[in-house]
Image (spheres, rainbow, N blue to C red):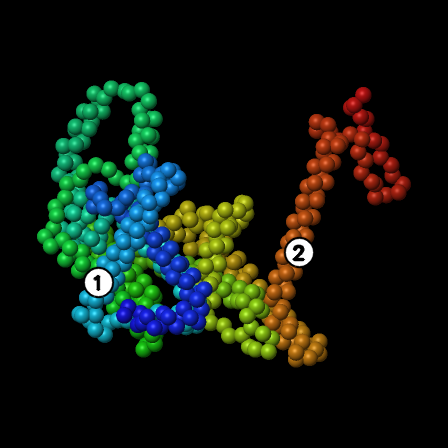
Amino acid sequence: EMFDATLKDRELSFQSAPGTTMFLHWLVGMVYVFYFASFILLLREVLRPGVLWFLRNLNDPDFNPVQEMIHLPIYRHLRRFILSVIVFGSIVLLMLWLPIRIIKYLLPNFLPYNVMLYSINGTFSCYVILFSINIIFIVLRKLKDKGHGYIIHFVKDLHSYLLGDQEENENNANQQPNNQHARNNAIPVVGEGLHAAHQAILQQGGPVGFQPYRRPLKFPLRVALLYLTVLMFSVFAGRWLMSFWTGTAKIHELYTAACGLYVCWLTIRAVTVLVAWMPQGRRVIFQKVKEWSLMIMKTLIVAILLAGVVPLLLGLLFELVIVAPLRVPLDQTPLFYPWQDWALGVLHAKIIAAITLMGPQWWLKTVIEQVYANGIRNIDLHFIIRKLAAPVISVLLLSLCVPYIIASGVVPLLGVTAEMQNLVQRRIYPFLLMVVVLMGILSFQVRQFKRLYEHIKNDKYLVGQRLVNYERKSGKPGTSTTPPQSSQE
């Protein structure tokens, strides 16, 4: 009911491609378990200690899964396996089946979600899924680091139960004199730093201790309403926003849900920031709005260049070099889809950036590290365009345009046949890639042989800082060089 797929459709899909169907179901299960465990670890850092009492802490220093796997008997492992299946199955029922039944009862026309795995752009849905999940985890991490529970805080009394009561404003005046008095009368303990380190290791699983809280009235109903609101309102808002430029076309619900979540989060974030700026006066608010508007404009320009133009060119180049020669025969015309090329380019750009940051020091790594160090607040638009965007875009444009000019402008002047022109146009990109790779390998080997030659020469003839018994051949036949006197006697 969620995706408008019946058991008969599942059976037909399994009969048509059993291996692919089993692999996809296994992959979905692995992703579900992995992200569920990661989300639980993140919630332990955000929520109040004691909320997740029914789930085992994976960061517990006393928990050693490998040792338990070796020492515990088989029936204990079978019992844990059955318990895990029951827990995960119950969670699926509570998080998916029950809300779907409620949504079907309240809004019959809201479901099913539109998931077009068979569409043209369906090949890069996995990349967008991973990108969206990473963004959500980054947002939650930022909320945790700042100590705010903006979304939960708007639901009355859930903030106290989930995050605990914050009594800093009430006890701050009393704690500071007491802490100062305690510091003055404290007795130094030998090995206090080591003890603190051991305590930090023991407490790495999350915050410990008791925090006061108030259990709200009708707590399950509040949580259910919050979950249904997130499940429905984000998709509804995303559908409404994306309908302005897509019209009546059906869009993958992943994009609508991500768009709705991000817009809601940005709206709540903007409202909370404005409320925090209110007591500072109108002039300060206008100054802050001016600064943030300028920063947002710079960020948008950088995003258009680095997250729009560069991935599009990179994905198109990858399509011409790798995908089209392998998938499209010579007697057929390849079709290019900008959205798909852009999505693949985003993935390739992230991989290239990660490899660059892990590699040796060179100009691209230096520029990327400088951009990361500056951050968004101190963004330098001129530096990014001049040092990063312009060189990268120039290289990509040259890689795209030079082969096309050769294949479409120079080759027809040679008087070759139409079949040869088509062959050159379709194979010039991988051919030039092979040429560039071979030239890079040859230049690398030449540099390595030069270094080996210098190393052997220095080991054989260098004594201290002076070469002995070594004569370089003279370019002129009439000149002769007198060998230096050997220091070895």
**CA neighbours of label 2 inside 10 A, class few (<14), some (14 to 19), many (20+):** few
Going 11% across and 54% down the picture, which residue do you hit? Answer: 218
Going 19% across and 28% down the picture, which residue do you hit? Answer: 179
* Residue under label 2: 439
Badge 2 amino acid: Met
The answer to whether residue 439 shows anywhere in this view is yes
Kindly indicate the quadrant of the structure image that contains residue 119. bottom left
The answer to whether residue 233 shows anywhere in this view is no
**From the image, which quarter does the C terminus lie in?**
top right
- The circle drawn on residue 314 is none
Q: Is residue 356 above or below residue 172?
A: below
Pick the residue in front: 210 or 394. Answer: 210
**From the image, which quarter does the N terminus lie in?**
bottom left
Q: Where in the figure is residue 451, as x and y percent of width and height?
A: 68, 41
* Residue under label 1: 98
Badge 1 amino acid: Leu
Kindly indicate the quadrant of the structure image that contains residue 282. bottom left
Q: Where in the figure is residue 448, as x and y percent of width and height?
A: 67, 45
Q: Earlier in the sequence, mark 1 or mark 2?
A: 1
**CA neighbours of label 1 inside 10 A, class few (<14), some (14 to 19), many (20+):** few
Nearer to us of marks 1 and 2 is: 1
Alpha carbon separation for disc pair 1 and 2 = 61 Å
Going 40% across and 70% down the picture, which residue do you hit? Answer: 13
Pick the residue in front: 278 or 341. Answer: 341
Pick the residue in front: 83 or 133. Answer: 83
Q: Where in the figure is residue 6, as x and y percent of width and height?
A: 31, 72
Q: Where in the figure is residue 76, as x and y percent of width and height?
A: 32, 44
Question: For the residue labelled by badge 1, is the local secondary structure a helix, a strand or a loop?
Answer: helix
Q: State left or right for residue 446 relative to residue 333.
A: right
